[in-house]
Image (tube, helix red, strand yellow):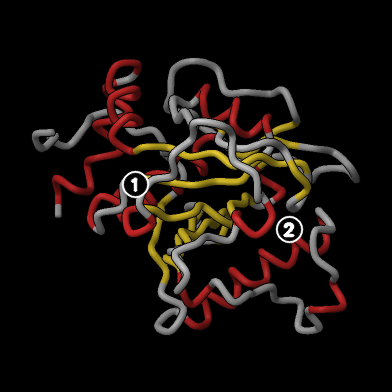
């Protein structure tokens, strides 16, 4: 595609995205590990808190990943995601749990792929389930009230877009064409509403909750977003034009 000039419309007016290097940004990555602990251990119960006495969640995939964070206007951490690269066996974390693949699915080359992992938004920036953003970005969002116990919420679309933009720019610059993700059906629907369509490639299984493996081809994603919302694609690609 040709270079896109700086778009006038912004799709995340209250948040900024940043690539994070754990070895360089040690203090900041500590805050990311603390957020991961809050979400995966305390809020969702996916991991046992006793296994993380320092209240910081990390795992063996961190060293083989690219990390991204979203900050609010006060430069507070409000969202996080990582892209996990293939391991020495050319496999991804989701394949340990999602072992079945649907018929006629051909997995893309591992060298051109990465898995979206640990996608999370701070609890104060989540919408109650069913509260999807209205058509027509940008959205002016302020922190939501803290959720009650068992109060499921959808993540802020601004923060989600900020994180996906960071992953997209990184992927284009590093020859990553395919994204894997193990996610709930509700999140897949939210992403589709935001013009980020993923293809389900396997059945649902228990992997930090009931999830199924999905894959997205970034070339297809670019085409779909460009057809449905050209301004969104221009905003996604703007950092590439500026670099």
Whole-percent x, y for residue 10 in the image: 33, 33
Q: Kindly indicate the quadrant of the structure image that contains residue 216.
A: top left
User: Mark 1 and mark 2: span between their CA atoms?
Assistant: 24 Å
Kindly state the secondary structure of the residue where label 2 is placed. Answer: helix
Q: Secondary structure at mark 1?
A: helix
Q: Quadrant of the N terminus?
A: top left
- Residue 98 at x, y percent in the picture: 66, 49
Residue 21: % across, % down: 41, 75
> 33 or 71: nearer the eye?
33
Residue that badge 1 annotates: 168
Q: Residues within 10 Å of mark 1 (few under 14, many from 20)?
A: many
Please give left or right for residue 110 compared with residue 199 in the image: left
Total numbered badges shown on the rendered structure? 2
Q: Residues within 10 Å of mark 2 (few under 14, many from 20)?
A: many
Residue closer to the observer: 130 or 113: 113
The quadrant of the picture occupied by the C terminus is: bottom left
**Residue 40 shown left or right of residue 2 in the figure:** right
**Residue visible at 62% across and 52% down in the picture:** 120
Q: Residue at x 14, y 34 (%)?
A: 4
Question: Which residue is at 54% across, 34% downward?
Answer: 157
Label 2 belongs to which residue? Answer: 39
Give the mark toward the camera: 1 or 2: 1
**Residue found at x 63% / y 34%:** 187
Q: Residue furthest front?
A: 103
């Amino acid at each position: 595609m040709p270079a896109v000039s700086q778009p006038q419309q912004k799709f995340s007016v209250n948040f900024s995205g940043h690539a994070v290097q754990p070895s360089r940004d040690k203090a900041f990555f500590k805050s990311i590990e603390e957020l991961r602990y809050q979400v995966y251990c305390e809020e969702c119960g996916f991991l046992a808190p006793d296994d993380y006495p320092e209240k910081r969640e990390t795992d063996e995939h961190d060293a083989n990943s690219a990390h991204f964070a979203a900050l609010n206007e006060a430069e507070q951490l409000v969202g996080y995601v990582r892209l996990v690269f293939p391991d020495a066996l050319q496999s991804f974390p989701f394949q340990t749990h999602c072992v079945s693949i649907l018929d006629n699915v051909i997995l893309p080359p591992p060298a051109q792929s990465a898995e979206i992992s640990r996608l999370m938004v701070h609890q104060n920036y989540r919408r109650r389930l069913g509260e999807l953003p209205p058509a027509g970005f940008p959205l002016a969002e302020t922190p939501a009230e803290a959720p009650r116990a068992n109060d499921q919420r959808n993540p802020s679309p601004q923060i989600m877009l900020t994180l996906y933009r960071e992953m997209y720019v990184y992927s284009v610059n590093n020859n990553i064409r395919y994204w894997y993700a193990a996610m709930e059906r509700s999140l897949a629907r939210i992403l589709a509403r935001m013009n980020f369509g993923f293809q389900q490639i396997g059945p649902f299984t228990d992997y930090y909750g009931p999830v199924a493996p999905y894959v997205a081809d970034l070339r297809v994603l670019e085409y779909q977003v460009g057809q449905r919302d050209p301004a969104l694609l221009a905003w996604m690609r703007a950092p590439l034009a500026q670099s």
